[in-house]
Structures are given as structure tokens and as C-alpha cells.
Image: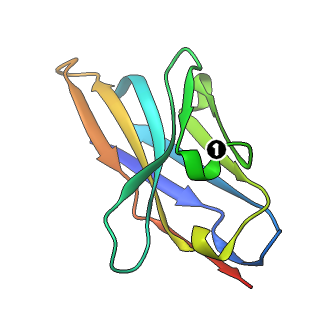
Amino acid sequence: QVQVVESGGGLVQAGGSLRLSCAAAGSIFTINAMGWYSQAQGKQRELVAGITRGGRTNYADSVKGRFTISRDNAKNTVWLQMNSLKPEDTAVYYCKVSVRTVVTKSLYDYWGQGTQVTVSS
């Protein structure tokens, strides 16, 4: 089994910064892609930023130039540095990791429990 735990959310004023962390632990052989998704109230969950094992990144247009995703493969951890936050960034942020497990070597997606980010105007 694999556990995914996020941290770092909170309340911040517009223009401020937050850094989200996500750590995966358990029966992990390797982790392929890692990503952050956001889900605002009443809306569908959507990709914010993703990063491959090799470090290639992609971002939603709305966060380009403001958010930075990074990872440490040795620590099975991914971060999302969020700068110049706007009220429209308010959402629950979820971490997703694509894990190849030790036992089966099959690829599975695991989600964290989510962390609330609230940006006040």
C-alpha cells in the first residue's frame, strides 16, 4: 500500500506565497509522474502542474510564471511553490503520484487527502 500526505496549505493574502509539500511512502518501487491538482468549490478537479521523473514540467496557463513544481526522487517528495497568489487560486489542492509498486511492478495512481489554500483579497 502507498500513502500520500500533503501539507503546507493555509490562508494568505493576495500577492503572498505558499509552499505545498507532498510525500509518498509505502510499497514503492519507483514513482513516475507527480502532480498537483486543484478543485475549487463547485468545480471539477484540474491539473495545476506536473513533473516527470526526469524533471520535465508542465503547468496550467493560469499559473505559469507564478507557480513552480519540483521533486526529490530520493525522498519521494514533490513541492509546489506558489507565488503572487490570487483569490482565484483558492481551492483544495491535491497531490497525485503514479507509483510502480514493489510487488507487482504495475503502475497505480494515488491521491493525497488534499490541503486547503485560501487567498484573501
Q: Mark 1 points at which residue?
A: 79
Q: Is residue 38 above or below residue 12?
A: above
Q: Position of residue 111 (x, y in %)?
A: 35, 51
Asked whether 80 or 63 is in front, the reply is: 63
Q: In this view, does 58 lie above or below 100?
A: below
Q: Is residue 5 above or below residue 119?
A: above
- For residue 16, which quarter of the picture? bottom right
Q: Where is residue 45 in the image (x, y as percent from the top left)?
A: 35, 60
> Residue at 17% of width from left, 20% of height from top?
104
Q: Where is residue 58 in the image (x, y as percent from the top left)?
A: 54, 32
Task: Give the colouring mode of the picture.
Answer: rainbow
Q: Position of residue 38 (x, y in %)?
A: 46, 60
Horizontal placement of 66 versus 62: left or right? right
Residue type, numbered disc 1 = Trp
- Quick one: label 1, few (<14), some, or many (20+) residues within 10 Å? many
- For residue 83, which quarter of the picture? bottom right
Q: Is residue 56 above or below residue 48?
A: above
> Residue at 65% of width from left, 76% of height from top?
87
Asked whether 84 or 28 is in front, the reply is: 84
Quadrant occupied by the C terminus? bottom right
Horizontal placement of 70 versus 83: left or right? left
